[in-house]
Image (cartoon, helix red, strand yellow):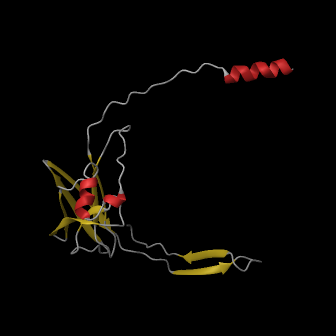
């Protein structure tokens, strides 16, 4: 029995392994656009460039960043800073400017101080980069908050409980 266990252990430990090498062809660089607008908030649009799967990720030394110009210089391989970005809402065009935004990553995004998201409004995003035009649209629907919210303690426990709420689904579609 002891010889059988040694045999199986040696087979497992010394079994053949074949190294598999996967060659992923390089992909053309494309623009990646992340944008959102919420009720009561400014729009935020972040434009970056795609990279190949095995490309190294740039290392950013945060101590070397002293102002937004040095940040743009450090992130120039990742972000697009020369795009023309606009949002059209209620037949009015709002140009977006490149600004520092510590709440996003990368911390540079296109935004507008004159446009604030409103309930039941539609927005069309137009991005012009070189000769390319990229468009999208969004709509902030009517809000339907919960009717009531309350907390109930769990039975036989004075610190745990359940948050409950009552919600009435609107009878209209959408």
Residue 134: x and y, percent?
Answer: 21, 52
92, above or below 30, in the image: below
- Left or right of residue 9, residue 103 in this image: left
Q: Which residue sits at x=77%, y=18%? A: 7
Observer-nearest of 135 and 59: 59
Quadrant of the image for the C terminus?
bottom left
Q: Residue furthest left?
A: 131
> For the point 29% across and 50% down, which residue is it?
78
Q: Nearer the viewer, residue 28 or 91?
A: 28
Q: Quadrant of the N terminus?
A: top right
Residue 24, above or below 15: below
Label total for image: 0
- Residue 9 or 142: which is nearer the viewer? 9
Residue that lies at the very extreme toward the front in this rendered image = 64
160 on left or right of 38 = right
Up the image or down, 144 lies above or below 78; here it is below
Query: Along the horizontal axis of the image, is 142 left or right of 79?
Result: right
Residue 145 in picture, x, y percent from top left:
45, 77
Q: Residue at x 80, y 22 (%)?
A: 5
Classify residue 149 as left or right of residue 99. right
Q: Position of residue 161 (x, y in %)?
A: 67, 75
Q: Where residue 26 sits in the image (x, y, percent)? A: 31, 33
Toward the viewer: 34 or 29?
A: 29
Identified at 19% across, 71% down, the residue is: 90
């Amino acid at each position: 029995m002891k010889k059988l266990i040694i045999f199986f252990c040696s087979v497992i430990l010394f079994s053949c392994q074949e190294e598999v090498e996967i060659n992923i062809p390089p992909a053309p660089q494309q623009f990646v656009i992340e944008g959102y607008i919420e009720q009561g908030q400014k729009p935020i649009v972040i434009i970056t460039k795609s990279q190949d799967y095995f490309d190294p990720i740039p290392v950013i030394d945060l101590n070397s960043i002293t102002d937004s110009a040095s940040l743009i210089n450090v992130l120039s391989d990742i972000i697009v800073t020369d795009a023309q970005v606009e949002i059209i809402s209620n037949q009015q065009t709002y140009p977006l400017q490149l600004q520092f935004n510590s709440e996003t990553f990368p911390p540079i995004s296109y935004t507008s101080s004159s446009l604030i998201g409103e309930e039941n409004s539609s927005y069309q995003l137009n991005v012009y980069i070189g000769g390319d035009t990229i468009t999208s649209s969004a709509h902030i629907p009517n809000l339907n908050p919960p009717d009531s919210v309350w907390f109930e303690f769990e039975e036989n426990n004075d610190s745990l409980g359940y948050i409950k709420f009552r919600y009435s689904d609107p009878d209209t579609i959408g």
